[in-house]
Amino acid sequence: MRQQWSITVSETYYTQAVHGPYEMFDAGDFTLSSGQVLRGLQIAYATHGTLSANKDNVILFPSWYSGTSKILEQAYIGEGRVLDPSKYFIILVNQIGNGLSNAPQNTPAPFNAASFPYISIEDDVRAQHLLLTKKFGLSKLALVLGGSMGAQQTYEWAVRFPDFVERAAPIAGTAKGTAHNKLLVETFKGAIMSDPRWNEGWYGDGSEVHRGLRRHARLFAASGFTPKLYNTEGWRSLGFTTPEDFLTGFVEGYFLPMDPNNLLTMLSKWHDGDVSRMTDGCLKTALSRITAQVSVIAIKEDAFFPLADIEAEQKLIPGSELNVISSDWGHLGLFGVDPGYNAAIDTHLKALLARKLAKQPKHATADA
Amino acid sequence: MRQQWSITVSETYYTQAVHGPYEMFDAGDFTLSSGQVLRGLQIAYATHGTLSANKDNVILFPSWYSGTSKILEQAYIGEGRVLDPSKYFIILVNQIGNGLSNAPQNTPAPFNAASFPYISIEDDVRAQHLLLTKKFGLSKLALVLGGSMGAQQTYEWAVRFPDFVERAAPIAGTAKGTAHNKLLVETFKGAIMSDPRWNEGWYGDGSEVHRGLRRHARLFAASGFTPKLYNTEGWRSLGFTTPEDFLTGFVEGYFLPMDPNNLLTMLSKWHDGDVSRMTDGCLKTALSRITAQVSVIAIKEDAFFPLADIEAEQKLIPGSELNVISSDWGHLGLFGVDPGYNAAIDTHLKALLARKLAKQPKHATADA
């Protein structure tokens, strides 16, 4: 279907038609880490499978930057995959700011658009904790996993609620951002914010900011995929015909319907992700709080989250293991377009789910 | 000395006071590869050392993106270095568009600013050929070397004028740009051109475009240095105190006095560099024209010109060797800030200069 240019893109994009089905959880008046209250916080989530009687088959999977529960479902869930709904009760959670959960574009004035509050990874994880406890009466997760910003949330879960998390698989992400990663994120933000039509967040419809979104998309593509993917024209597997066709048709096309302020809310959260806020800035102390069985998964060619940075953190997690996947798609192998990546992920998740738990939790759960 | 914000930066920057001493060569009315004539083309160059009686001690060193003859001198030349002016006659050439040679900012109307013509790597090398033959009466180069865009010019020299070039050392650059490298260059261009004050090239003074230049600088820093440099705070060796201090004080400070159109002229040239234009698009045929002894030098951690891309080309050059240098400074190790890089470069250049030449040139020189 050919889309008219004048269409209000965001209104058709952030919908059940595109990303559903999903449910809404009302987290109430939610006090953010900043101290500000987000009134009537709505968290969008999708579930797959059936909760077992003793509630021991729950997997939580928070969304990455720009993603929703739909891409997580498409790329990771299915019969024959490890995340099999016939065995597990899988909860896919949309992070705050992604446009299905509360976000600048869907929050009523006066807290809409540029006035949407600052959100932290901690806020997502505390809101998800409310969802799991209030809605489903859970006290355990068999597994929490996530890629990129989902890994940030996974680390936050394992450090903040160690008794809740039996197993954790942070994929292609870090517990604490590095200076280089922050610089990358700043360049993504700058690409959007430098568009005069962004107007400090006070545009009409997001599509007005399409030039900033296009530049942002290309920055994402420059580091997100590997040079080898371009050399081997690996994008042909998706049906594109030239690098320009791929960059415009796939990467720009992916980001163009999104709301610029939504992306900026998530980018600020990504930029500031840091589990050591819980432990006065000491990362080692934070990571030593983890009692879960942890499989840290890195993508060898990842230029967003380099293997060396991921490995340095993994070494601080007692009893954890590091598993490395190679993909020409680099960081964006996360999207499930590389069959080799998908197979490797399933291998590592299967091994993790088979691991026995340590007998005694080492720490009390932190305040929610 | 504290600079006033209102100063016309470019007028103080592109001067003998900052980049001299250098000489000007008048290449006359120069027909560019595009067919357009650049009237009275001026090429700025600096020489070090003395031309020997039989003119067998000449080294040509063209400038890289944004650089001038001054940084080449500071980073590579000196007694005790391999590029020793007491032994060699070293010609440092400023590429067209860099602001000392003809460029958008120093060319009189009507061919100034956005109306400055498109320049190719070929144009630089043909103009340099005129300089060497007309000004110095040369027919041989003991060595041509260059980093990044200087490597592009080095490859162009060795392919276009094989009988002229006895030895060649392309450093951290390619003979033909890859799709990924072109994407990177496009993001650099986009950072400048998206600044509304750039105004399609018709700004007053370059400093009006400082926000675009700052974004461009940060993109450059994100891929130009390695994540490890940021992790280890290697920038402390230059006297900076935080990542932000380094990014603003060093990287933005480096680019801010430059003319945006000058940078864009060089970026277009970088983007399109391709020696295979001489051989109907066949890179293998182009590189097989080379008769020089070639030491291809790569920086292992280079995210602008990945080792794998450099190695793939080196394998197409008969009798060449590949030498790999490791530097936490990544591509920007070229700037001479890493003593380890500097020592390794000297080792490889010394070995190359000691190599005997093949007896018979394989090819006739191409038309100049």
Image: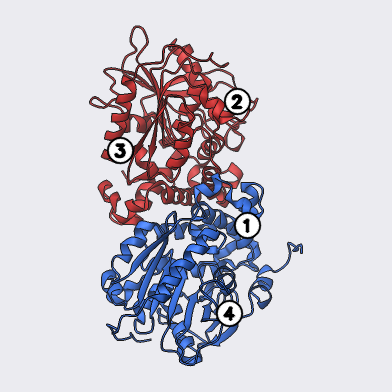
Chain colours: A blue, B red
Of the image marks 1 and 4, the number of the one nearer the N terminus? 4
| Label 1 chain ID | A
Task: Report the disc number at residue A272.
Answer: none
| Separation (CA) of disc 2 from disc 3 | 34 Å
Q: Taking A77 as reference, is B20 left or right?
A: left
Pinpoint residue A112: horizontal percent, then vertical percent: 57, 77
Q: Secondary structure at mark 2?
A: helix
Of the image marks 2 and 3, the number of the one nearer the N terminus? 2
Q: Kindly identify which residue carries mark 1.
A: A250
Compared to residue A62, the image places residue A244 above or below, namely above
Q: Quadrant of the C terminus of chain A?
A: bottom left
Task: Report the disc number at residue B341.
Answer: 3
Pinpoint residue A63: horizontal percent, then vertical percent: 51, 72
Please state which of residues B59 and B285 is positioned toward the viewer in this rendering. B285
Foreground mark, 1 or 4? 1
Identified at 34% across, 61% down, the residue is A311
| Separation (CA) of disc 4 from disc 2 | 59 Å
Q: Secondary structure at mark 3?
A: helix
